[in-house]
Image (cartoon, rainbow, N blue to C red):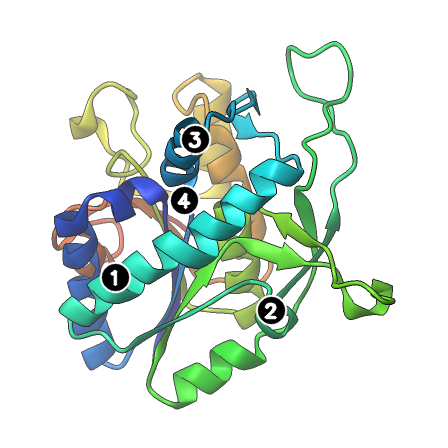
Amino acid sequence: MKTAVLKFGGDVVAETATLIAVLRDVQALVEEGWRFVLVHGGGPQASELQARLGLATLKVAGRRVTDATTLQVMKQILAGEVSVDVVAAARAAKLRAVGISGVSDGLISATRRPPIDVPGEDAPVDFGLVGEITEVRAHAVTHLWQGGFTPVVNSLGVAPESVAKEAACEVFNINADTVASTLAAHLEVDHLFLMTGVPGVLRDKDDVSTRIERLTPREASEAIAAGVIVDGMIPKVQEAFLRLEQGISAVHILGAGPGELAGEARTPGSRGTALVSE
């Protein structure tokens, strides 16, 4: 039995036909004996709700600053609208999905991230109520797997119960890629699939026909040094190789078109980019 974590963002969720096509791929693989955890973001939906409420969306280097009001929005979007939309689409795809939060049973425990250095900023940036993961407790995931269900996990985290006194444990907003990769490493899954707006790592970021089928750490380092891998793809690739060292067999960066996930799962490198150890 193969195990996998699949992460997709709110942009995939916003396109219902695309989302259902992805979930049909998941269902087809589940019927073949795979077990999946789905991890979703909800950035576009959060920004849209903030705009409707007249709230400014503050980002630094593309990353959202989460104050108390923004955290309320993220709770409503991640644990509410987006989670419900994914599970409803899963039902249409005949996939037995159950939505849970990173807060559920302390699945994702976290502490508040301290201010960090950001290129281009004069001083360390405080991103607010953003969490750094300290522990994963995957009992809820494994119980759902044993019952034949596919967990749908959002990217909220919660402070350890040891810090709670008379108030509820603090909740944090966490990057969905980080939640997915950390959960995948904890479960030691066979595959981590990261869906992006491009069909993999490209030699030319503006030409989808230049997809790289397979990358090792050495090849990736050379591509970064040569300026082939650029911008936001650099941290995604670097974190992927870190997770390989923690027990994941392969990390795949791929697009969200119909058949992309199933094709890449059955033949790594055929639809996306497979990142593997040397």
As measured in the structure, the alpha-carbon distance from the residue carrying label 2 to the one carrying label 1 is 26 Å
Residue 149: % across, % down: 34, 81
The residue beneath circle 2 is 107
As measured in the structure, the alpha-carbon distance from the residue carrying label 3 to the one carrying label 4 is 19 Å
The residue beneath circle 4 is 42
Question: Can residue 180 be seen by looking at this rendering?
Answer: yes
Mark 3 crowd level (few <14, some 14–19, many ≥20, 10 Å Cα)? some
Quarter assignment of residue 247: bottom right
* Drawn side of residue 192 relative to residue 175, left or right: left
As measured in the structure, the alpha-carbon distance from the residue carrying label 1 to the one carrying label 3 is 21 Å
As measured in the structure, the alpha-carbon distance from the residue carrying label 2 to the one carrying label 4 is 19 Å
Q: Is residue 95 above or below residue 235?
A: below
Circle 1: residue type: Ala
Foreground of the two, 126 or 148: 126
Do residues under tags 2 and 1 come within 8 Å of each other at their CB atoms? no
Mark 2 crowd level (few <14, some 14–19, many ≥20, 10 Å Cα)? many
Who comes first in sequence, dot 2 or dot 3? Answer: 2
* Drawn side of residue 237 relative to residue 171, left or right: left
Of circles 2 and 3, the one toward us is: 2
Q: Residue at x 50, y 41 (%)?
A: 217
Question: Can residue 218 be seen by looking at this rendering?
Answer: no
Who comes first in sequence, dot 4 or dot 1? Answer: 4
The residue beneath circle 3 is 233
Mark 4 crowd level (few <14, some 14–19, many ≥20, 10 Å Cα)? many
- Secondary structure under tag 3 reads helix
Q: Residue at x 28, y 48 (%)?
A: 13
Q: Residue at x 19, y 61 (%)?
A: 262
Circle 4: residue type: Gly
Foreground of the two, 263 or 69: 69
- Secondary structure under tag 4 reads loop
Which residue occupies the extreme front position in the image? Answer: 53
